[in-house]
Image: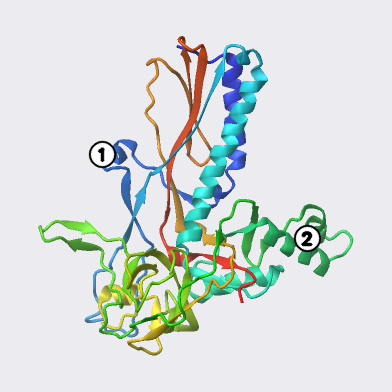
């Protein structure tokens, strides 16, 4: 067994401190602590409730309006197992700084992995798509997000936006010119540190690892039926019953729709549907803006999975009324689909804090089984485990740093992306 020296234990404590500093994005989401024994017995899956939305009615007499609210839930999975392994021989270990540098590199990599897990989740499943025809410039860009979220009834607090370095610096360039004056903190920070900070009620952050999205290649002639009695109008349900009589939860964030063709359509594409406008989450009134949808997967030549579902409440069912997110200002058997991501570019994700959760996991690595183990938890509950073992045959010290966690988008309609220079 290879035991940790006092110097290594101190270095591990310093590693954890630095790990906390590097976990910027993961501090901008909610944390949900799970029972690890229960998670092990359920395949690391737990169903988490979506925010309730309840209707209100006018008048004293509410006869006929007493109905059971429909509570929808979302499957949350602890599915990310990230590890950085390395080995050192007996001669390399003479330089203690070498081991410390490798530990710091491992910390940086794992912190980046956790941050990217959240970024990729929002980029791939966020449904509020902001098509910006201009290059990033500053306040106007953040105001578009603020307007879009307000229009749909998304809570006004704890909004975050991660922007690519090039777009972020363009916004900082605008601020340092537009508000230039000696001694002005906003102007000075924008000029000297390319810093934007809070803008238009949204806290901004710079990132150098945002994914890019190619231009949609789906044909202009793709159509979808939006008829009230058609197969594409969705009715949420909390549970479904199988033919065997067993009842199970339903994930209502996604819907499989039938379209005229899925040729050249790709996951991540954003689109609108003619005649389908957003509905305000509380009032259910039409916003006057077409709702944006995202392609989650292409399933066949004529079917694809999208988010969010098309919920118009046309049939009057309680669940549809409660969770209505669309208003059909017109219906058609061949409503036009118009793709929004028209030019390749960075996806700049934004979200309301309550929409995203991170679920810390725990690795049950045994001590006294041939390896020395150190473990610690970060500020947001993510456990980091460092283990070390000596191989007498090769004269190598094997070391690894591991972490286990999950991330979930509880409400895709409170998250989205903005893309610039879209024609």
Q: What residue is drawn where x is 31% and y is 47%?
A: 45
Q: In which quarter of the image is residue 101?
A: top right
Q: SS at mark 2? A: helix
Residue 278 position in % (x across, y down):
45, 79
Q: Is residue 1 left or right of residue 331?
A: right
Residue 50 position in % (x across, y down):
37, 61
For the N terminus, the image quarter is top left
Labels 1 and 2 touching (C-beta < 8 A): no
166 or 327, which is in the foreground?
166
Q: In this orientation, does residue 91 appear? A: yes
Q: Mark 2 points at which residue?
A: 186
Q: In this view, does 35 lie to the left or right of 200?
A: left
Q: Which of marks 1 and 2 is in front?
A: 1
Residue 111 position in % (x across, y down):
56, 40
Q: SS at mark 1? A: helix
Which disc number belongs to residue 215?
none
Q: Mark 1 points at which residue?
A: 41
């Amino acid at each position: 067994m290879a035991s940790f020296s006092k110097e290594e234990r101190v270095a591990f404590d310093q590693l954890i401190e630095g790990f906390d500093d590097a976990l910027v994005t993961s501090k901008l989401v909610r944390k949900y602590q799970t029972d690890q024994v229960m998670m092990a017995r359920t395949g690391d899956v737990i169903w988490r409730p979506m925010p309730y939305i309840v209707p209100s009615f006018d008048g004293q007499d509410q006869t006929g309006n007493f109905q059971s609210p429909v509570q929808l839930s979302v499957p949350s999975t602890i599915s990310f197992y990230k590890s950085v392994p390395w080995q050192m021989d007996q001669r390399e270990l003479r330089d203690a700084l070498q081991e410390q540098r490798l530990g710091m590199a491992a910390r940086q990599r794992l912190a980046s992995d956790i941050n990217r897990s959240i970024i990729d989740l929002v980029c791939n499943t966020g449904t509020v798509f902001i098509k910006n025809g201009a290059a990033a410039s500053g306040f106007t860009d953040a105001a578009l997000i603020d307007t879009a979220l307000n229009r749909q009834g998304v809570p006004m607090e704890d909004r975050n936006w991660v922007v690519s370095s090039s777009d972020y610096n363009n916004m900082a360039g605008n601020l340092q010119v537009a508000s230039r004056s000696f001694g002005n903190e906003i102007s000075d920070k924008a000029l000297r540190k390319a810093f934007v900070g809070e803008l238009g009620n949204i806290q901004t952050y710079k990132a150098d690892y945002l994914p890019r999205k190619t231009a949609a290649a789906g044909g202009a002639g793709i159509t979808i039926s939006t008829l009230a009695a058609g197969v594409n109008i969705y009715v949420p349900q909390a549970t479904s019953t199988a033919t065997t009589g067993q009842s199970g939860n339903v994930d209502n964030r996604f819907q499989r729709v039938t379209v005229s063709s899925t040729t050249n359509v790709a996951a991540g594409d954003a689109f609108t549907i003619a005649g389908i406008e957003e509905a305000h989450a509380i009032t259910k009134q039409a916003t006057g803006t077409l709702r944006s949808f995202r392609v989650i997967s292409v399933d066949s030549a004529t079917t694809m999975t999208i988010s969010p579902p098309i919920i118009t409440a046309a049939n009057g069912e309680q669940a549809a009324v409660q969770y209505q997110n669309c208003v059909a200002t017109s219906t058609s058997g061949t409503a036009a689909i118009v793709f929004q991501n028209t030019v390749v570019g960075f996806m700049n994700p934004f979200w309301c804090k309550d929409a995203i959760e991170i679920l810390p996991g725990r690795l049950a690595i045994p001590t006294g089984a041939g390896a020395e183990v150190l473990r610690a938890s970060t500020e947001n509950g993510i456990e980091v485990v460092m283990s070390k073992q000596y191989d007498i045959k090769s004269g190598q010290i094997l070391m690894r740093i591991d972490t286990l966690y999950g991330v979930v988008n509880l409400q895709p309609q409170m998250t989205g992306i903005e893309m610039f220079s879209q024609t």
